[in-house]
Image (cartoon, rainbow, N blue to C red):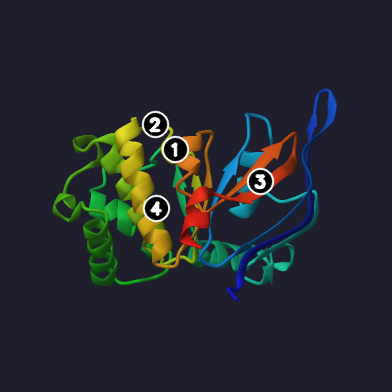
């Protein structure tokens, strides 16, 4: 049986507003095993973005427990948490967040600086990943010289550079046309087949169908959790 990468127990998250305490997440329980591909869905305001921020250790729950790769996040110090996040999670966002004055190679290699790797090793690993996403010949280009779809491929390469077990992708196709979105989702499927766990937020059913499991949020709660047709076919 696959080990559990994410385990959420009775998680709550509330925010203080001018109107009082707003409950963004209510009694959320969820486990995600290694190698799963999960789509997180729901309308705006359903809590899915808040949930992803907690999964990425970018925010803390108000109550409940979060175990990432077997470790209780609440019990980790600041440095321990930063190290766990850096080595376990790769992030992909709707906005590509590439540094415009850096080459694509330098953008991909950037997270490795915080790992203390030598320049030669950083660049070698970055070049390998650019080749993996089909952009090996663009290493010396800057982000403004390539398309939006290519920029997202670079962002995915950057997310992979620390060899994470888990990719968190927040609306990764939101700025892309339908054909380019399909290409990006095909790349995610390939990465998942290689064993990387993927958790992806999307509003779109056409994007979610690439996942093996759909978890739907509404009003701060999980209202459904089911295998997709793709998973049923695979089984």
Q: Nearer the viewer, mark 4 or mark 3?
A: 4
Tell me the element at label 1: loop
Q: Nearer the viewer, mark 1 or mark 4?
A: 4
Residue 167 percent across, percent down from the top left: 48, 56
Of pointers 4 and 3, the one earlier in the residue sequence: 3
Closer to the camera in the image, 98 or 128: 128
**Nearer to us: label 4 or label 2:** 4
Q: Nearer the viewer, residue 231 or 22?
A: 231
Instruction: Name the element at disc 3.
Output: helix
Q: CA distance from mark 2 to mark 1?
A: 6 Å
Q: Position of residue 26 (x, y in %)?
A: 80, 43
The CA span between labels 4 and 2 is 16 Å
Question: To which residue does mark 1 refer?
Answer: 94
Residue drawn at point x = 61 percent, y = 40 percent: 49
For marks 3 and 2, the one nearer the N-term is 3
**Label 4 SS:** helix
Looking at the image, can residue 234 be seen?
A: yes
Which residue is found at the position 44% from the left and 38% from the top?
94
* Left or right for 41, reference 154: right
Q: Which residue is mark 3?
A: 51
Real-space CA distance between mark 4 and mark 3, rounded to the nearest whole angstrom: 21 Å
In this orientation, which residue lies closer to the viewer: 15 or 120? 15
The residue labelled by disc 2 is: 175
- 10 Å crowding of disc 2: few (<14), some (14-19), many (20+): some
Q: Judge the density around disc 3: few (<14), some (14-19), many (≥20) Cα neighbours within 10 Å.
A: many
Q: Residue at x 26, y 42 (%)?
A: 150
């Amino acid at each position: 049986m696959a080990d559990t990468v994410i385990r959420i127990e009775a998680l709550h998250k509330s925010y203080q507003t001018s109107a009082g305490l707003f409950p963004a997440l209510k009694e959320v329980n969820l486990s995600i095993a290694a190698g799963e591909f999960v789509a997180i869905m729901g309308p705006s305001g359903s809590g899915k973005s808040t949930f992803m921020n907690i999964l990425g250790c970018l925010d803390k729950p108000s109550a409940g427990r979060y175990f990432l790769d077997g470790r209780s996040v609440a019990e980790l110090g600041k440095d321990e948490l930063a190290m766990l996040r850096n080595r376990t999670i790769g992030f992909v966002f709707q906005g590509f967040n590439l540094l415009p004055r850096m080459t694509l190679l330098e953008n991909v290699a950037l997270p490795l600086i915080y790992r203390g790797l030598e320049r030669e090793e950083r660049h070698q690993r970055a070049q390998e990943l650019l080749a993996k996403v089909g952009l090996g010949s663009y290493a010396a280009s800057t982000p403004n010289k390539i398309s939006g779809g290519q920029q997202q491929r670079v962002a995915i390469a950057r997310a992979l550079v620390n060899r994470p077990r888990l990719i968190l992708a927040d609306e990764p196709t939101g700025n892309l046309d339908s054909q380019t979105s399909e290409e990006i989702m095909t790349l995610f499927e390939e990465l998942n087949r290689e064993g990387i766990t993927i958790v992806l937020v999307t509003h779109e059913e056409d994007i979610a169908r690439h996942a093996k499991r759909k978890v739907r949020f509404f009003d701060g709660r999980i209202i459904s959790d089911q295998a997709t047709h793709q998973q049923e076919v695979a089984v």
